[in-house]
Amino acid sequence: MKQIKTPALIIGLLFSVTVSHAQLLNKVTRTANTASNVVQGAKGVEKVANKVKGKGGGGGFATGLKLDWTMFKQTPAITFNSLLYGTADGRCANYTATFIPNRTVSGKTVDAISEQSEYLRIKVFKDGQYMNYFEYSGDQVFDDGKKIKFNPPSNRYKRDGEFIGWSESFITDWGPGNYRLDFYAGDKMFYAFDFELHKLINDDPYGSIKEMYVTRGPWNNFAYLNYADTGNLVFGYYITHEEFKPFPANSRKTTKSVKWSVNMFKDNKLYAQHYGNGPNTAQVEQAKWNEVSCAFKLVNKPGEIKFADLPDGAYRIELSVEGENNARIYKFTVKDKKVVQIPEQDRSKNTDPTRLIEGWNDYFWLKLEK
């Protein structure tokens, strides 16, 4: 496959995995963008989805295996948290798929090695145009076969007559634009994910780097509720910064310390706060999305909140992040001691299974109030 080349410095900034990328990253200096710019840009998942037209189709691989899609009652999907950590740095890999059958319509068990080229694949579209596809290994299966990983193959494989290696799961060579990933299992496209690869221009005429790329999508549009091993209720969200040079006196220092705090209201009364005697501090990396989380302590009596002990009621979470003018607001309801899923996550209410927000049974996703 012949790839379109983009400036090496840009690639090095966003993807620091290979040695050459890491060396380039160390050379980068930056000028400041505002934190509100980050939030507004990251809220673009709906905009991206509207710009990229169509689903499936558009060249690529031959028809795959005909799988037995009656094996599970649930429709297949990609877990939302794996979409975020698998795509946030532009590397399309290590996704967790749910309810993918491992046998064909004839009853034969899929061989993840010999049938790799027909089993798990992703088509990549940029601005609605098909670019190419990646193959994935399907040998990591867990949770009684109900989950399978889209991992990069351990061995190189041929695509269009050329050998493809681990580094080919990056999309940086195709440059900025609105991207869509179409996930396939066998001959079926079962999921789609939209995000944007954006280019920022450095307005500092003395800066050694004139531009850098960042990924934008649903990272700032969603937060989640989860539970720790202790049973404590956990709240989590995602954060980044897009400043070329956040510390004028030290151009090599690019990670920022950002203060943040969370208040939880139940039935419009303050009910809980994040643990600690003051704001928490997040270490926020440049142009990379970091996951940040906390547990809660009650405000009217000692003790923490246990996930299983949330009383029924209407809840509101207010997340204050240093540098952002307004708090991020998330609302949810607890009914019959269960967190009510948003319609996009509830399989009984979601109208498009290819866009389901899959949280499995341990992530409850919260949508940012507009």
Image (cartoon, grey):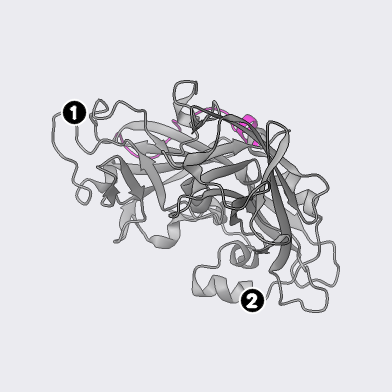
- Residue type at mark 2? Asn
Q: Is residue 354 above or below residue 296?
A: above
The residue that appears at 58% across and 50% down in the rendered structure is: 236
Residue 180 visible to the viewer: yes
Of marks 1 and 2, which one's residue comes earlier in the chain? Answer: 2
Q: Is residue 17 above or below residue 191?
A: below
Q: In which quadrant will I find the C terminus?
A: top right
Residue 80 visible to the viewer: no
Residue 62 among those drawn in magenta: yes
Q: Secondary structure at mark 1?
A: loop
Mark 1 nearby-residue class (10 Å; few <14, some 14–19, many ≥20): some
- Please tell me in which quadrant of the rendered image residue 115 appears: top left
Which is more toward the observer, 262 or 356?
Answer: 262
Q: Is residue 89 left or right of residue 9?
A: left
- What residue range appears in magenta? 48-63
x and y, in percent, of residue 21 in the image? 55, 70
- Residue type at mark 1? Val
x and y, in percent, of residue 307 in the image? 50, 43
Q: Secondary structure at mark 2?
A: loop
Disc assigned to residue 105: 1
The residue that appears at 19% across and 41% down in the rendered structure is: 110
x and y, in percent, of residue 231 in the image? 46, 50
Q: Is residue 205 above or below residue 323?
A: below
Find the distance from the CA under tag 1 to the CA under tag 2: 52 Å
Disc assigned to residue 26: 2
- Please tell me in which quadrant of the rendered image residue 239 appears: bottom right
Q: Are marks 1 and 2 in contact (CB under 8 Å)?
A: no
Residue 83 among those drawn in magenta: no
Query: Is the stretch drawn in magenta largely helix, strand or loop?
Result: loop
Disc assigned to residue 284: none
Mark 2 nearby-residue class (10 Å; few <14, some 14–19, many ≥20): some
